[in-house]
């Protein structure tokens, strides 16, 4: 029996594969490599000493995905595969709806056809309304403000409807906050092919001299230093949350929704200063205008995940920056 990971060579998918393999699971990974690289598969095996079966498959290619289901008997699916750049989703909404929603429907149909009833779904804090007050709970109002966030919210609703149809699907929907960091080995980390919207890749590039400085979008928010505050979570903590979600489904199959975050916010300047400690150098930055739609403060209440499935983030912002810098240095040497 094996676990299928869609988007398995991506940032979060690759770290989750490591955690699954270390816990004795067999892993089959599919990815279209639109925002990742195939050599991640070898690096996962190098970390764990265990093989990963990989298929270069797009979820929109239903027949190729069907062949994967025909080749393996899956107990569960962890579904990461999605386009995820918020700004790109605004300029290319049709592509985002097709890739994220249609791909999820294809996957759910094949799960039904082949009798796979356990799903862990990668969602996002972007499903919450801008008006919702932090700390955000799973019951905070949802009103996604971007096409990306709406695709995830639509997929959540599809999963709920399939569960409620009585066809056997049970699922854990995980709403992520801001994953950063890398594996402590330095062998896998965030390596996007596309221009990301998130902060950490730019901080790392400024530290390594690849870009001149980090753009800080606004320093006049009502926060301690005027810069935006977000809930940053180490990607390894996030990956471990998926193991806890699988165990939850095995012990008590039903439908659950959990926030995965640290439960506290760090400002943009906090992250820059922590990264300076990690790399032992000053990181240049430039204050620019606020971005439309950015909020002053967004952070999670993750207590439900701790209460119901025993998960709690363990790693600090210093750990996140240290491991990100280890990964960045490896990339420079490669």
Image (cartoon, rainbow, N blue to C red):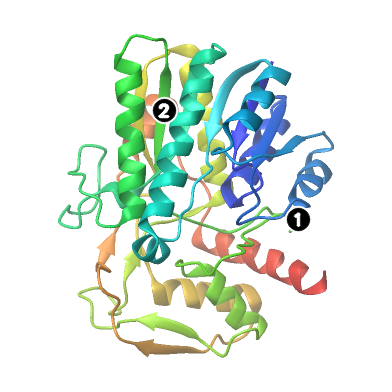
- Let me know if residue 72 appears in the view: no
Classify 165 as above or below 52: above
Answer left or right for 30 relative to 124. Answer: right
Residue drawn at point x = 55 percent, y = 26 percent? 77
Judge the density around disc 2: few (<14), some (14-19), many (≥20) Cα neighbours within 10 Å. Answer: many
Q: What SS does tag 2 mark?
A: strand
Q: Label 2 vs label 1: CA separation?
A: 29 Å
Q: What SS does tag 1 mark?
A: loop
Q: Nearer the viewer, residue 160 or 236?
A: 160
First reached walking from the N terminus: tag 2 or tag 1: 2
Q: Which residue is mark 1?
A: 187
Q: Which residue is mark 2?
A: 172
Q: In which image quadrant can residue 203 be found? A: bottom right
Give the x, y percent position of residue 104. Answer: 45, 34
Q: Nearer the viewer, residue 120 or 240?
A: 120
Residue drawn at point x = 42 percent, y = 13 percent? 253
Give the x, y percent position of residue 217. Answer: 35, 80
Residue drawn at point x = 74 percent, y = 37 percent? 54
Q: Quadrant of the C terminus?
A: bottom right
Total number of numbered discs in the rendering: 2
Give the x, y percent position of residue 196. Answer: 50, 67
């Amino acid at each position: 029996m094996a676990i299928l990971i869609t988007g398995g060579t991506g940032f979060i998918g690759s770290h989750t594969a490591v955690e699954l393999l270390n816990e004795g699971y067999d892993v089959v990974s599919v990815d279209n490599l639109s925002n990742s690289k195939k050599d991640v598969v070898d690096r996962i095996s190098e970390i764990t000493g265990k093989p990963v079966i990989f298929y270069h498959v797009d979820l929109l290619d239903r027949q190729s995905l069907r062949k994967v289901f025909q080749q393996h008997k899956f107990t569960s699916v962890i579904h990461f595969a999605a386009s995820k750049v918020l700004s790109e989703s605004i300029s290319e909404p049709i592509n985002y709806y097709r890739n994220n929603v249609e791909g999820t429907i294809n996957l759910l149909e094949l799960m039904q056809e082949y009798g796979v009833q356990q799903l862990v779904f990668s969602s996002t804090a972007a499903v919450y309304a801008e008006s919702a007050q932090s700390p955000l709970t799973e019951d905070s109002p949802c009103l996604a403000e971007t096409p990306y966030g709406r695709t995830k919210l639509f997929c959540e609703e599809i999963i709920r409807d399939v569960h409620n149809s009585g066809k056997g699907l049970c699922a854990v929907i995980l709403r992520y906050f801001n994953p950063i960091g890398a594996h402590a080995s330095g062998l896998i980390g965030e390596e996007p092919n596309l221009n990301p919207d998130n902060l950490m890749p730019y901080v790392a590039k400024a530290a390594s001299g690849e870009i001149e400085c980090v753009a800080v979008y606004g320093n006049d928010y009502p926060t301690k230093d005027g810069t935006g505050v977000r809930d940053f979570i180490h990607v390894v903590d996030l990956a471990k949350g998926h193991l806890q979600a699988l165990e939850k489904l095995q012990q008590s199959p039903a439908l659950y929704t959990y926030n995965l975050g640290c439960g506290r916010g760090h400002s943009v300047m906090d992250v820059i200063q922590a990264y300076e400690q990690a790399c032992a150098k000053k990181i240049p930055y430039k204050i620019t205008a606020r971005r439309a739609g950015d909020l002053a403060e967004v952070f999670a209440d993750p207590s439900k995940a701790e209460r119901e499935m025993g998960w709690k983030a363990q790693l600090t912002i210093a750990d996140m920056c240290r491991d990100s810098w280890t990964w960045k240095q490896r990339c420079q040497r490669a």
